[in-house]
Amino acid sequence: MTWWRKLKTNRLAQVGAILLIGLYTVALGADFFAPYSPYATQPNGSLLPPTQVYWRDAETGRFFPHVYPTTQGAVDLETGEREIIVDRTEPSPIRIFHRNDDGRLTLFDTVGPGKLNLLGTDEQARDQFSRLVHGSRVSLSVGLIGIAISFPLGMLVGGMAGYFGGAVDAVLMRFVEVLMTIPSIYLLVALAAVLPAGISSSQRFLLIILITSLVGWAGLARVIRGQVLSIKEQEFVQASRVMGGRSLYIITRHILPQTATYGIIAATLAIPGFILAEAVLSFIGLGIQQPDASWGNMLTLATNASILVLQPWLVWPPAILIVVTSLAFNLLGDGLRDALDPRTLKS
């Protein structure tokens, strides 16, 4: 377990792993961490900035965490700024591990007319934090789905090409090279545009991920082929062949496991590409559609300059999460690469 001890000494890899564990924990427990439904309109029915938390009640003087009912007033036609009206007569205490109005246990909620919108509300008065949490399920799962489809296919095709060689190698590698010449972003846009309009956003995106995964394995197949060319000449492979082992058995049982180290590292580093693909497609309106939430379609508001200036809380949270997630996967992938490097790994 030398590689594990080496990985534990890599602080950046640990930071990446901790961030990913936290992000996926929140995504799996979205119903618990999100205080409100991502589709529900807040009672105030208006676009509001992040809710301010108060600790002392202005009327009674008591100290306890609470919020006040907040609504939107008139809009300044010259500056575009919105007046925020706070009703300080009805303090709403904040409760931890509280059951909300629909009986669902949440990490936090309020008792009373005031609502705790940590990241404000959008133009349809939906809680931005709840949408961000539920959107993480889509944005974080697409990378795992894409890798689960593309990497086994890439390793198998690369293993077959390297093991058999000759005509099999030539045909498979020419096919791989054709796939690698296709610009992925243009392919995604074209595929998204021709999909039927009647399908749901989830079905649309799963189809896009499926088709993209069937193309994205080409680069991995080339690398695996090169590794198999050297592995197949080793003694344990020759011994299995002499003992009558079938080709597919030798490839899957003896050769591909020797390339697993590279596969794990490459998969870790490739996941951010699928996450960014989802963000790009949803950003340009070809991925997850409203009212469903994903980090990408929450960023579509960034195309409005007035929102960037007057309501930045609608834009920066999903942007930061996309950057942090991609960075965390890259930190973990770099750490795994260093820890599993055979040139530095000691028995």
Image (cartoon, rainbow, N blue to C red):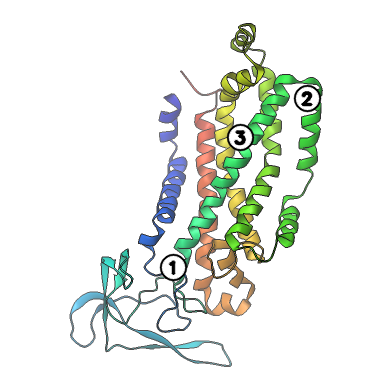
Circles 2 and 3: CB distance less than 8 Å? no
Mark carried by residue 129 = 1
Q: Quadrant of residue 322?
A: bottom right
Please state the horizontal and vertical placement of residue 329, each as a whole percent of the image: 52, 45
Counting residues from the start of the chain, the first of labels 2 and 3 encountered is 3
In this picture, residue 71 sits left or right of residue 214 = left
Counting residues from the start of the chain, the first of labels 3 and 1 encountered is 1
Q: Secondary structure at mark 2?
A: helix
In this picture, residue 328 sits left or right of residue 197 = left
The vertical placement of 33 against 151, above or below, is: below
Q: Nearer the viewer, mark 1 or mark 2?
A: 2
- Residue topped by disc 3: 152
Residue visible at 80% across and 20% down in the picture: 166
Amino acid type, mark 2? Val
Q: CA distance from mark 2 to mark 3?
A: 19 Å
- Residue topped by disc 2: 168
Q: Quadrant of residue 65?
A: bottom left
Q: Which quadrant is the N terminus positioned in?
A: top left
The vertical placement of 155 against 117, above or below, is: above
Circles 3 and 1: CB distance less than 8 Å? no
Residue visible at 55% across and 41% down in the picture: 268
Residue visible at 49% across and 87% down in the picture: 82
Bin the neighbour count of mark 1 within 10 Å (Cα to Cα): few under 14, some 14-19, many 20 and up. Answer: many
Q: CA distance from mark 3 to mark 1?
A: 36 Å
Q: Secondary structure at mark 1?
A: helix
